[in-house]
Amino acid sequence: MKEAEKIWMNGKFVDWKDANIHVLSHVVHYGSGFFEGIRFYKTKNGSAIFRLKEHIDRLYDSAKIYRTEIPYSKAEFSEAMIETLKINKLESAYIRPLIYRGYSEMGVNPKTCPVDSMIAAWEWGAYLGEEALESGVSVKISSWRRLAPDTMPTMAKASGNYLSSQLIKMEALEDGYDEGIALDYSGYVSEGSGENLFIIKDNIIYTPAMNGSALPGITRDSIIKIAKDFGYEIKETGIPREMLYIADELFFTGTAAEVTPVSSVDKIKIGSGKRGPITEKIQKRFFEIVKGEVEDKYGWLTEVK
Ligand code: PPE
């Protein structure tokens, strides 16, 4: 990774190499962390954070689901993120805040351990490769399902959830694919290991509904708004696996993945096997917005001076 200089830890900046925690911290053993991934884009006039408020809200929601009180107000934590960007003199970055249960007692109960926090930011390019933004990625349906709704909450962006993502990702790479898509507990399409999914069929845009065990993605929400503004009909619904095979176009969305087309699923070519026209139109608008090339009519950008 492209290291920056300083990391914010519990209210203080420390050197990148000194941003360490104790090996007996609760989070290391039991996955008790809540995090976000946020992009900071270089725009036409300075640089701006994309949808800061929504990311902060989701972070606090994730913590709330796990009965965790973050010891900072949302305003204080947002300010700390901005300071992290400034002190590292970044023009564009991926911001990674994490709230986690630290070191005190051993044992499952997180309540005996302190609520610690950190914010790092560094330059991170295209998640699935620069080329993939145009040519798309190959995907397999994972043999691993996403978490059933009464097992672990998928609305929380919790560190422990990413064991599921790791199994999906490793299996896909091992089998020669770029990425995996998991089905939910009832067999409907859920999401990629770190991305939400959109399906285009006969000019209608579909995406798995909130009961599909997927993370409520902020990029997903942005794409729904952009597509609606273009006049497309959007259906948030249950999606059977085979609908992916017969789709005209497919694409992933995520903070890291941005808008990445899917070229094949289980070696079945999707549409033309390249980025489709509707995907291209939506992707183009997404990048125009984040780069400040069109008016920020949704108020999604927080400028950092
Ligand atoms: N689903 C999952 C499981 C997921 O991890 C992400 C983001 C999304 C959907 C899309 O959510 P959003 O970023 O709000 O549009 N994954 C983050 C972490 C990726 C990683 O490898 O780390 C991200 O994209 O930042």
Image (cartoon, grey):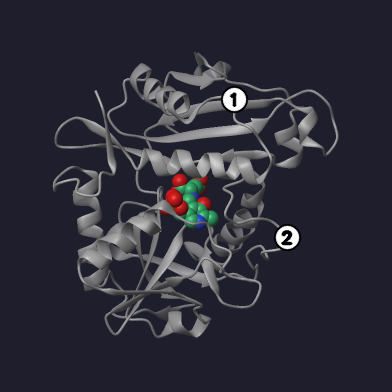
Depth-wise, is mark 2 or mark 1 nearer the camera? 1
Q: In whole angstroms, how far apart are the C-alphas of marks 2 and 1?
A: 27 Å
Q: Position of residue 87 (x, y in %)?
A: 37, 16
Instruction: Spot the residue most to the right.
Output: 107
* Callout 2 crowding tier (Cα within 10 Å): few <14, some 14–19, many ≥20: few
Left or right: 242 as drawn, with respect to 82: right
Disc 1 marks which residue?
71
Name the residue type under label 2: Thr
Count the numbered circles shown.
Answer: 2
> Any mark on residue 206, and which?
none
Disc 2 marks which residue?
151
Q: Nearer the viewer, residue 263 or 157?
A: 157
Residue appearing at x 27%, y 69% in the figure = 275
Residue appearing at x 56%, y 44% in the figure = 61
Q: Nearer the viewer, residue 126 or 10?
A: 10
Q: In the picture shown, does residue 91 fall above or below 238?
A: above
